Image: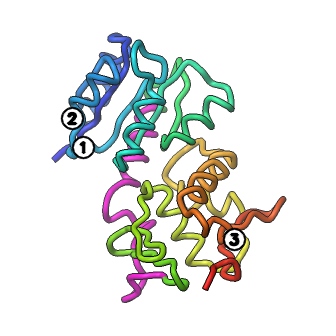
Amino acid sequence: MSDKILIVDDDRNICEILEFNLTNEGYHVECAYSAEEALKKLSSKHALILLDVMMGGMSGYKMAEKLRKEHNPIPIIFLTAKDTENDMLTGFSVGGDDYISKPFSVKEVIARVRAIVKRAKPNDKNTETAGSTQKITFKNIVIDLEAKELLIDGNRVILTKTEFELLTFLAKNPDKILSRDDIIDVVWHETPFITERTVDVHITRLRKKMGEYAAVIVNRSGYGYKFDTDEIKH
């Protein structure tokens, strides 16, 4: 069965171009011309959203923020004419998985869609477990590799797939400094055009969700990040 993609853009010409090309690539494509319409059409069967930022009514950022607050982990690729670093970081900070500036190359869009959809598959190699090890446990922090969830003090913490993969990679290498390039090579290895700032934004989001345990992810200026077991409270 082909993967289902929802395109959300108030420019019908862009929707038509993307729908035509993605359909030719074998995807099942639906279009919505506003965030409000998209929220009505969106279902658990969709594998990815291509989401315009600037639309009448609810913006793409607001829609993404709403979905993440509702703990919907569907991958989101933003499409926008705004291409400053701050715009890009805003997109990642509200839960976006990728960011494409307009005007864009259709080939680039297809490449990024393919990469994000592939990475979001349940059997993605980035989250496969080794041997019989199904959980990574550090005192009150439990990373369940089979259920793909984080438990802190027995409470489930909702993470996006990217956040979970990022935390898992750090936790599998405790007390080891991992450069941003190391992290990109593992967590975003199928996704082109990822920058070091992308890593920083996702780390910030992950720390925020970890609450009082945020300090377990330590930044070593000029080197990278590490999962510091000394910071885990008893």
Looking at the image, which is closer to me, 221 or 178?
221
Q: Is residue 216 above or below residue 185?
A: below
Q: Nearer the N terminus, badge 1 or badge 3? A: 1
Tell whether label 2 touches label 3 (CB within 8 Å).
Answer: no
Q: Is residue 125 above or below residue 201?
A: below
Q: Is residue 121 magenta?
A: yes
For the point 41% across and 29% down, which residue is it?
Answer: 51
Give the residue at mark 3.
226
**Residue 95 rendering spot, x and y as whole percentages:** 49, 43
Q: Is residue 122 above or below residue 81?
A: below
Looking at the image, which is closer to me, 13 or 140?
140
Looking at the image, which is closer to me, 216 or 225?
216
For the point 36% across and 89% down, which residue is it?
Answer: 132
Three-letter code, disc 1: Asp
Helix, strand or loop under label 1:
loop
Three-letter code, disc 2: His
Give the quarter of the image for residue 126.
bottom left
Give the residue at mark 2.
28
